[in-house]
Amino acid sequence: MLKKVLFCDRIILMESDLLMKLDLRAPLFYVKIEALPDKIAEKDEFLLCYDLNSAQSLNIEPDREQFLGALAFAGRKKCDSDAVQAEIVSLPAGNYLFTQYRSALNSEERLDLAIEQQKDGLWERHKPKNRLFIRYLFEDGSFVTQLFRPVG
C-alpha cells in the first residue's frame, strides 16, 4: 500500500510499509575514481557500484561472505576543477529498490543494509538485478548513505 509520494525534479519516491521504491528520472553522473577515500568531507558525494554474486542476488537468505562481487566502479561528484577528459560513470535512470540511512556507513554496515534491502524486496515480490549502487552524500546537516538496487 502506498503511503506517500514525494516529487522532486529528478525522482519520484514511493514508500510502502517495508520498502521504498524509487523512479530515478535522470541519471546521476560522477567522475570515475579508483576507490572510496578513507574520509568523506561534507561537500563530497560518491557513488560505488558492485556486481553481486548471481547465486546470492535472488536468495532470501544470502550467504553474507559471498553476497558482494567485485567493485564495478567508483565515482566522485564532478567538480569544476575536474578534467574535461575524465571518464564518467553514472547511476542510470530507472526503477530501484531504495534504502537510505542518515550516517556514513562502513563496509560491514553497508553489507547488512544491502542484505536487508534484498530480503524486503524479495518478500514484496520484486526481482532485483545483480547490481548494487551505494551513494554517499552530505544532506541537511548530516552524512547519508543510500542504496539503490535496480529492479526489472
Image (cartoon, rainbow, N blue to C red):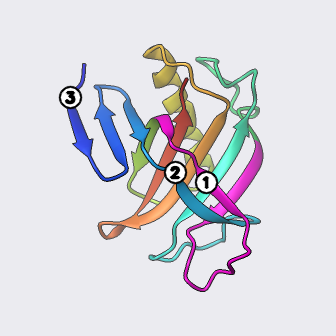
Q: Position of residue 54 (x, y in %)?
A: 75, 25
Q: Position of residue 87 (x, y in %)?
A: 73, 66
Q: For residue 55, what is the image quadrant?
A: top right
What's the residue type where badge 1 is placed?
Ser
Among numbered discs 2 and 3, the one appearing first in the sequence: 3
Q: Secondary structure at mark 3?
A: loop
Among numbered discs 1 and 3, the one appearing first in the sequence: 3
Residue 21 visible in the displayed image: yes
Tell me, yes or no, whether the highlighted magenta stretch contains residue 61.
no
Where residue 41 is drawn, which disc sits there? none
Q: Which residues are magenta?
A: 70-96
In the image: residue 22, left or right of residue 27: left
Q: Secondary structure at mark 1?
A: strand
Dot 2 and dot 1 residues touching (CB under 8 Å): yes
Quadrant holding the N terminus:
top left
Q: Is residue 107 above or below residue 55?
A: below
**In terms of depth relative to the viewer, which is nearer, 97 or 9?**
9
**In terms of depth relative to the viewer, which is nearer, 151 or 27?**
27
Q: Secondary structure at mark 2?
A: loop
- Which of discs 2 and 3 lies nearer the camera? The answer is 2
What's the residue type where badge 2 is placed?
Pro
Q: For residue 62, what is the image quadrant?
A: top right
Where residue 3 is drawn, which disc sits there? 3
* Residue located 42% across and 44% down the image: 25
Q: Which residue is mark 2?
A: 27
Where residue 90 is drawn, which disc sits there? 1
* Residue located 29% across and 51% down the image: 8
Q: Dot 3, crowdedness within 10 Å: few (<14), some or many (≥20)?
A: few
Tell me, yes or no, whether the highlighted magenta stretch contains residue 77.
yes
* Residue located 64% across and 19% down the image: 58
